Amino acid sequence: MVRIDGNGGGTSLIRVRNLDKAYVRGGQAVHVLRGLNLDVEEGEFVAFMGPSGSGKTTLLNLLGGLDLPSSGSITVAGDEITALSAAKLTAWRARHVGFIFQMYNLMPVLTAFQNVELPLLLTRLSKAERRAHAEAALELVGLKDRIGHYPRELSGGQEQRVAIARAIVADPTFLLCDEPTGDLDRASADEVMDLLHRLCADYGKTILLVTHDPRAAERARTLLHLEKGALVEAVKKHEA
C-alpha cells in the first residue's frame, strides 16, 4: 500500500513526514518540496510523474540519502536516515539503496562484470563470492553472455541492464530509478520496464521510479503526481 496523507501504519518500509526542501537562489528561498508525506510498504512499485521542476528527482535524492531535507523526517526499515551522521549515512546507503540512472553511469574502462562487482568491493565477501553474486545478477538481467564486454561494446539497453545488475547485486532494500528509460528507444525501454516489473513481482523488490514516460509509469502498481513540491494525486494501478 502507498499513502500520501501521513496516516500510514508503523509497518511501512518507507515513512516520510512533513518533508520540506528549499534552496537559496539569489538570496531567496525556493521551496522544491513542501510538507510532503509518504508511506510505501515493502514490495511496492511506485512511479512519480510531474512537470520539470516539480521535485521528483529531489525527492528520490532525499530518499536515497544523497541530500538532506530542510525539515521533516525520512525513515526506512526503522532507520531515521535524516538523523544519521554523514559516515553512517554512507554505510546505510551502500547497504540499502540500489540506484539506476538515465545515463547508466557505467565505468567505461571496466567490463560488465567489473561494473557489477564494484559495489561488492565495499563488502566482506570473498573474491569467489563476489564473482558468484555478479554472475547471478548479470544472468538475471539476461546478460551473462556479455560478462567480459565493455560498455562501448553494448547497446544502450544492454548498458542499462548492466546498471540494473549493479544496482541489485548487493540485494538492497529498495531501488531508486531516475528516468531509467529516458535515453532508450521504445523496444529497449520496454525491456528495461519488463525487467523492473519482474524484480518487483517475482523477487519482491521495492521500486520507486521517476519518469516522464506514461508508458513506463503504467508498469508501476501506484502512480503519484508531484506538482509544485506536493503530492496531489495518487492513482492505484492494475498490475501489468
Image (cartoon, rainbow, N blue to C red):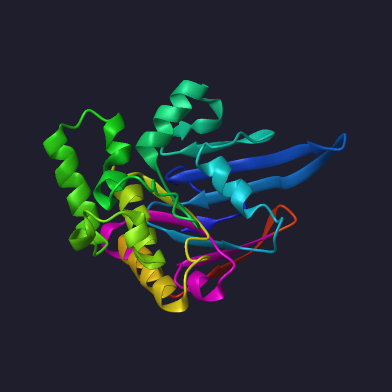
* Residue occupying the point 38% across, 39% down: 96
* Whole-percent x, y for residue 109 in the image: 35, 45
Query: Magenta span has 53?
Result: no
Is 48 situated left or right of 164 in this image? right
Residue found farthest to the right: 27
* Residue occupying the point 40% across, 49% down: 106
Quadrant position of the C terminus in the picture:
bottom left
Give the vertical position of 240 relative to 178 (above or below). Answer: below
Query: Magenta span has 222?
Result: yes
* Whole-percent x, y for residue 154 in the image: 33, 63
Q: 236 or 61, which is in the foreground?
A: 61
* Residue occupying the point 68% across, 33% down: 71
Give the vertical position of 129 relative to 198 (above or below). Answer: above
* Residue occupying the point 75% across, 38% down: 23
* Whole-percent x, y for residue 138 in the image: 23, 56
Q: Toward which corner of the image does residue 151 lie, by quadrant? A: bottom left
Give, as a single range, the part of the protein colored magenta: 201-226
Q: Toward which corner of the image does residue 173 lie, by quadrant? A: top left
Is any part of residue 187 visible from this angle? yes
Question: How many numbered markers are drawn?
Answer: 0
